[in-house]
């Protein structure tokens, strides 16, 4: 099993940086955005799963080290595997409303081609 990073806490919420995996698992650093974000939410919900563990579990179920995440497959798979509700939200106001109620939110974003984070 690969070395695991200790979870940190930021604003009372579990936090892992996918960039911190650069010397441990380049797949997480390069394509692990979704599994890292999902791991933080799962940890906050009391599920003990770190990004590298989640990447292994999700291979072939909506995540790959070469192409990253397919949210249409990955998020429903995670919901079933960890018995957590998953809802796709396309309304910014609904997202804000749920966040104000304390629900964790995972945002899907992309960088502009030719740029780096």
Image (cartoon, rainbow, N blue to C red):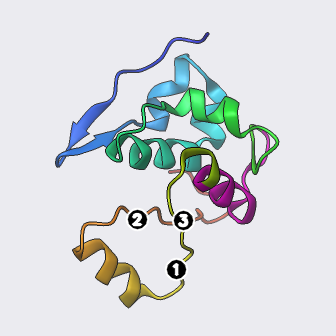
Q: Which one is in front in this view, the residue at disc 3 or the one at disc 2?
A: 3
Residue at the image position 59 percent from the left and 12 percent from the top: 2
Residue at the image position 41 percent from the left and 20 percent from the top: 5
Looking at the rendering, which quadrant does residue 115 occupy?
bottom right
Would you say residue 73 sits in the magenta stretch?
Answer: yes
Stretch of the chain drawn in magenta? 66-79
Looking at the rendered structure, the secondary structure element under dot 2 is: loop
Residue at the image position 42 percent from the left and 31 percent from the top: 48
* Rendering coords of residue 94 (x, y %): 39, 86
Alpha-carbon neighbours of circle 3 within 10 Å: few (<14), some, or many (≥20)? few
Q: Earlier in the sequence, mark 2 or mark 1?
A: 1
- In the rendered image, which residue does mark 1 sit on? 89
Whole-angstrom CA distance, mark 3 to mark 2, is 10 Å
In the picture, measured across the screen, residue 90 lies left or right of residue 96, that is right
Q: Earlier in the sequence, mark 3 or mark 2?
A: 3
* Rendering coords of residue 23 (x, y %): 54, 17
In depth, the one of 66 and 35 nearer the eye is 35
Q: Are marks 2 and 1 in contact (CB under 8 Å)?
A: yes
Alpha-carbon neighbours of circle 2 within 10 Å: few (<14), some, or many (≥20)? some
Against 105, is 78 above or below?
above
Against 117, is 30 above or below?
above
Looking at the rendered structure, the secondary structure element under dot 3 is: loop
Against 30, is 98 above or below?
below
In the picture, measured across the screen, residue 107 lies left or right of residue 98, that is right
In depth, the one of 59 and 30 nearer the eye is 59
In the picture, measured across the screen, residue 53 lies left or right of residue 103, that is right
Q: Main secondary structure of the magenta part?
A: helix
Whole-angstrom CA distance, mark 2 to mark 1, is 10 Å
* Rendering coords of residue 32 (x, y %): 60, 41
Looking at the rendered structure, the secondary structure element under dot 1 is: loop
């Amino acid at each position: 099993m690969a070395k695991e990073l200790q979870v940190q806490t930021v604003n009372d919420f579990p936090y892992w940086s996918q960039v911190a995996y650069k010397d441990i698992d380049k797949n997480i650093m390069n394509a692990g955005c979704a599994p890292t974000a999902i791991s933080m939410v799962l940890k906050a919900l009391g599920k003990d799963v770190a990004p590298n563990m989640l990447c292994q579990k999700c291979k072939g179920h909506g995540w790959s080290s070469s192409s990253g995440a397919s949210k249409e497959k990955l998020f429903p798979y995670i919901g079933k595997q960890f018995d957590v509700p998953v809802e796709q939200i396309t309304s910014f106001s609904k997202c804000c409303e749920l966040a104000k109620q304390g629900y964790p939110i995972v945002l899907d974003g992309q960088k502009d081609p030719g740029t780096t984070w």
